[in-house]
Amino acid sequence: MRVPLVLLVDDDPQSLKLLSDALAGQPFALAVALDGAMALRQIQREEPDLVLLDAIMPGMDGFEVCRRLQADPATRDIPIIFMTSLADTASRVRGLELGAVDYVTKPFVRAELAARVRAQIAVRAGARALAEKNAELEQAAAALARARDTLEAEVIRRTDELMATNQRLTHMNRVAAMSELAASIAHELNQPLAAILSNAQAARRLLQRPTPDVNEALSALADIVDDDRRAATIIQRMRAMLKKGTPRADGQNLNELASEVARLVGNDALLRGVALRLDLTPRLPEVRGDGIQLQQVVLNLVVNALDAVADRPAGARLVVVRTRGNGKDRVLLSVEDSGKGIAPAEMERVFEAFYTTKAEGLGVGLPISRSIVEAHGGRLWAENNPGEGATFWCALPIGEEKGA
């Protein structure tokens, strides 16, 4: 740790000795100069933390030394305490006007002199610490600005790539609309791609704010990576399912699957003005199956429910996702909407491949969902609510207990 340095300037050797004795034992080092010119040379060799300067000296007096130090940007911040005689009020005033921070009178009181010197050294140390902290903050701000520029460029690049990918996928859907495999893949990928695009656009907005929110932008980019991986996994699992392969059989918590779906479609529901609610039973027994496929079932049911309430007045658009146990060997998941319900003649037809009541629908979501549920040993069906709207029910067998 650097020891503070105090420069004593006086043309009287006896005064210098008295000053040195008075400041001996203090937490700083001492240097001496017998005139103004020597003081300036000493300061050029080693910058002191404080100059204790005699005002009246032959040749270059203390006032001239002070003026030169104040005129030089490299030394203007060095604090100066003038030493004057008790009756020399004019010198004290002139010294303060030239930029001195304090003065002491001769003959001086040893305790007072030491206290004034310690106080000014403490102020000097605080100013240096503040300057260093400001420099660190400026460096950090510059680094943050560079990171923001790099991140913004990366977000723009990825957004452009994702938009191009989305356009290519749209074209593929039009060309292969009559192919069950192509239509199925397009249907299943719609939500993760929409989430990717939404998060990319959100990250761009966060970085274009007057004060960019880098942490939130990084969180949006992390969601993009997760949704991209999810899309790749959907393709792999969908191909396996269409080949009539055996689904994976891991322990799955329907509450977690439903919560993840709510996160995926949360922005979409908000934009549509739909209230999406979760009513999940705690400590729900696990089911065994393929998590991606079962989550896709929940996602299809929720998206259909959002579509079903689209024509309802604002404030009347409600979708509720519930989970329950049946007290025996099944776990129930239901998706209830406040739409107009399903015509009795269409209650079973909605599960037929390529049958749809939507102008832009492909009619593959519900058939695929039913085939997934049945492959897991479960059942998927629909009912009209007593008042308005419809509810889609999914019943799945409880998985075997671990260690059984």
Image (tube, rainbow, N blue to C red):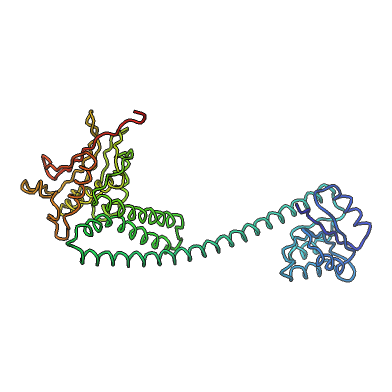
Q: Give 40 or 261, whichever is nearer the viewer.
A: 261
Judge left or right: residue 79 versus residue 236: right
Q: Give 308 or 299, whichever is nearer the viewer.
A: 299
* Quadrant of the snapshot with the C terminus: top left
Q: Give 393 or 319, whichever is nearer the viewer.
A: 393
Q: Residue furthest right?
A: 14
Residue 389: x and y in percent read: 13, 45
| Numbered marks: total | 0
Judge left or right: residue 222 versus residue 140: left
Q: Which residue is located at x 55 percent, y 61 percent?
A: 141
Q: Quadrant of residue 91?
A: bottom right
Judge left or right: residue 258 versus residue 383: right
Q: Which residue is located at x 31 percent, y 53 percent?
A: 236
Q: Which residue is located at x 33 percent, y 40 percent?
A: 250
Q: Quadrant of residue 355?
A: bottom left
Residue 345: x and y in percent read: 5, 48
Image vertical order of residue 10 relative to residue 255, above or below: below
Q: Which residue is located at x 39 percent, y 63 percent?
A: 204
Residue 332: x and y in percent read: 22, 36
Image vertical order of residue 77 relative to residue 335, above or below: below
Q: Quadrant of residue 272?
A: bottom left
